[in-house]
Image (spheres, rainbow, N blue to C red):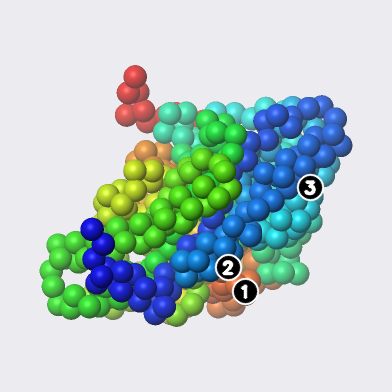
C-alpha cells in the first residue's frame, strides 16, 4: 500500500536533495559483428548500435517528463571490442573506436563503453593490439570509454598486464595534455569487473548478457545526507537503519525507471545499480554523508569505519527494493566528482593512502584522482597493483582511474567540467616499486579462490 508520506518524501528528494537517475544504459552484444575485414566490422557495429539504441534518448526524455524524475545520462555499453577481431592491428582498433564515437554522436548519448579487454590470465595477440591502441583511441574520440580487467580472485593478478597499464596511462595523459590529460578520466583498470555495470568508464556488455538489455544506475548522496541530518544525535545503529530506508526508496525509483525503459524500448530489464554516485554539485557528496555522521572532515580517523557502515546499509536497503541489483552497487568515492572529497583533498585531510584504505569497504576503488604529471609509469603500476590486490584478496570489484596531469604538480588543479568535475593534484609516495613491477608474471590466485 502506498504511503502518502513516502511519496512526499521521494518528491522532496528529487526537488531539494539532488536525487536523480544517473544513467539509463543500454547494453548491446556485438558478437555477431565480428570478422576479419575491419571496414565491414565497423559498418556492422555502427548499424547495430544506432538501430538498437535509436530510441534510447527519446524514451529517457519521455520517462523524465512523465514521472518528473531527472535522468542525467543516456549511455550505451557494448561487448569488449577486443573480441571482435583476432587479426586486427592497433590502427584497425582505432578505426573501431572512431566508429563507436560516431554512433554515440548519432544517438546523442554522452558516453559509450566497452572499448577494452579482459586479460586477467593473459593477453591474446588481438588484445595486445587493442591495449596498445587505447591512448590514441581516447585522444581521438570524445565519448568512448575504455576499461581493462587485469585480475580476478579466480585467476590471480596479471602483473604483465599491469605493467602495460602504467605505460598506457602515461601515454594517454601525454596525448591529451592540452585538456588536463582528460583521456585518463575515460580509462579504468579493474579487478573482478562486473559484466552488467551501467556506470562509466567501466561499463561493457558481458558475454553472458542477453542480446540487448537496459539497466539503470541511480544516485542520491544528497538524500542520504539529509536523512542522517534529520535523525539528529542518534547512535550508529539508528543511522544504519536510516540509510537502509533511504536506499530502499532511492532504489524503488530506479526500478520504476528501469521497468518503464525496458517496456518502452522492448528489451529485457537487466539490473539496478544502487550506487551512491556523487557530483561536484553542493549537497550531492558522499564525503558529506560521512561528515554528517560526525567526522570533522572526510579522511580523518574513523572515515573507513563510517564508509563501511554506509556501504553495507546502502546494499541492504537496495536489495530489499529490487530483485535484480547488480553492477557495482554501493558508495562511490571519485575525488574529482565529489565536492566534499575535493575539499578534503585540498586541505590535506584526504590522502592517497587513506583513499586506498577506504576502497577495501566501498564500491570500486581509487577513482578520478589527479597526481603529478611526472609520476613514473612504474609508480602508477604500483598504485594499480596495490588496489587490484585489495579486490582479489577480498573477492570484490576494485579499480583505478588516475590522471597523471602533464605539467601539473602538487598544489595545482585539473578542471574537466560537468560530472567529471575538478581535482587538486595529490602527492604520491616517491619511493620506487620499479624493480618489483619489472619482475612481471602472475601473482597467483588466493587460496580461498578454490571453492569448487
Residue 99, compared with residue 354, is above or below; it is: above
Query: Residue 195: in sight, yes or no?
Result: yes
Tell whether label 3 touches label 2 (CB within 8 Å): no
Residue 276: x and y in percent read 40, 61
Please name the residue that numbered disc 2 is placed on. Answer: 420
Where disc 2 sits, the SS reads: helix
Q: Which of 2 and 33 lies nearest the eye of the viewer?
A: 2
Label 1 vs label 3, nearer the camera: 3
Q: Where, quadrant-wise, is the N terminus in this rendering?
A: bottom left
How crowded pointer 2 is (Cα within 10 Å; few <14, some 14-19, many 20+) is rated as: some
Q: Which label belongs to residue 417?
A: 1
> What is the secondary structure assignment of the residue under circle 3?
helix
Residue at position x 81%, y 39% from top? 42
| Residue visible at 54% across and 74% down in the picture | 424
Q: In which image quadrant can residue 41 be found?
A: top right
* Position of residue 373 in the picture relative to residue 258 (left or right): right
| Distance from Cα at disc 2 to Cα at disc 1 | 6 Å
| Most foreground residue, 329 or 441 | 329
Picture coordinates of residue 249 (x, y %)? 31, 61
Mark sitting earlier along the chain (2/3):
3
Image marks 2 and 1: residues in contact by CB distance under 8 Å: yes
Which of label 2 and label 3 is nearer to you? 3
**Is residue 198 among the parts visible in the rendering?**
no
Residue at 48% x, 42% y is 270
Name the residue beneath numbered marker 3: 99
Amino acid at each position: 500500500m502506498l504511503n502518502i508520506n513516502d511519496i512526499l518524501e521521494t518528491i522532496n528528494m528529487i526537488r531539494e536533495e539532488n536525487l536523480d537517475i544517473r544513467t539509463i544504459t543500454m547494453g548491446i552484444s556485438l558478437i555477431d559483428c565480428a570478422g576479419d575485414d575491419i571496414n565491414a566490422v565497423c559498418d556492422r557495429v555502427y548499424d547495430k548500435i544506432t538501430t538498437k539504441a535509436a530510441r534510447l534518448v527519446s524514451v529517457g526524455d519521455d520517462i523524465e517528463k512523465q514521472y518528473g524524475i531527472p535522468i542525467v545520462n543516456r549511455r550505451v555499453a557494448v561487448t569488449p571490442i577486443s573480441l571482435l577481431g583476432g587479426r586486427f592491428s592497433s590502427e584497425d582498433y582505432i578505426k573501431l573506436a572512431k566508429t563507436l564515437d560516431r554512433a554515440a554522436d548519432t544517438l546523442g548519448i554522452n558516453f559509450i563503453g566497452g572499448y577494452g579487454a579482459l586479460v586477467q590470465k593473459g593477453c591474446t595477440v588481438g588484445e595486445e593490439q587493442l591495449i596498445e591502441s587505447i591512448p590514441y583511441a581516447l585522444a581521438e574520440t570524445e565519448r568512448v570509454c575504455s576499461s581493462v580487467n587485469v585480475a580476478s580472485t579466480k585467476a590471480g593478478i596479471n602483473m604483465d598486464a599491469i605493467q602495460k597499464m602504467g605505460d598506457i596511462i602515461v601515454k594517454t595523459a601525454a596525448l591529451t595534455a592540452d585538456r588536463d590529460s582528460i583521456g585518463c578520466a575515460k580509462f579504468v583498470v579493474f579487478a573482478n569487473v562486473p559484466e552488467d555495470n551501467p556506470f562509466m568508464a567501466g561499463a561493457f556488455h558481458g558475454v553472458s548478457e542477453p542480446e540487448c538489455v537496459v539497466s539503470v544506475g541511480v544516485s542520491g548522496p544528497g538524500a542520504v545526507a539529509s536523512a542522517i541530518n534529520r535523525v539528529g544525535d542518534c547512535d550508529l545503529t539508528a543511522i544504519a537503519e536510516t540509510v537502509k530506508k533511504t536506499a530502499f526508496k532511492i532504489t524503488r525509483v530506479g526500478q520504476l525507471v528501469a521497468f518503464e525503459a525496458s517496456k518502452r524500448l522492448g528489451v529485457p530489464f537487466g539490473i539496478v545499480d544502487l550506487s551512491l554516485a556523487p557530483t561536484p554539485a553542493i549537497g550531492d557528496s558522499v564525503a558529506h554523508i560521512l561528515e554528517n555522521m560526525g567526522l570533522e572532515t572526510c579522511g580523518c580517523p574513523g572515515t573507513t569505519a563510517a564508509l563501511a557502515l554506509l556501504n553495507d546499509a546502502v546494499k541492504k536497503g537496495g536489495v530489499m527494493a529490487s530483485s535484480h541489483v547488480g553492477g557495482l552497487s554501493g558508495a562511490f568515492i571519485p575525488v574529482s566528482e565529489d565536492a566534499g572529497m575535493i575539499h578534503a583533498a585540498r586541505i590535506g585531510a584526504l590522502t592517497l593512502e587513506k583513499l586506498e584504505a577506504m576502497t577495501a569497504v566501498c564500491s570500486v576503488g581509487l577513482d578520478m584522482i589527479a597526481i603529478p604529471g611526472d609520476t613514473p609509469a612504474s609508480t602508477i603500476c604500483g598504485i594499480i597493483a596495490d588496489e587490484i590486490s585489495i579486490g582479489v584478496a577480498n573477492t570484490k570489484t576494485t579499480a583505478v582511474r588516475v590522471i597523471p596531469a602533464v605539467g601539473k604538480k602538487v598544489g595545482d588543479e585539473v578542471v574537466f567540467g560537468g560530472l567529471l568535475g575538478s581535482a587538486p593534484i595529490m602527492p604520491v609516495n616517491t619511493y620506487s616499486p620499479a624493480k618489483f613491477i619489472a619482475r612481471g608474471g602472475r601473482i597467483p590466485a588466493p587460496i580461498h579462490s578454490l571453492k569448487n
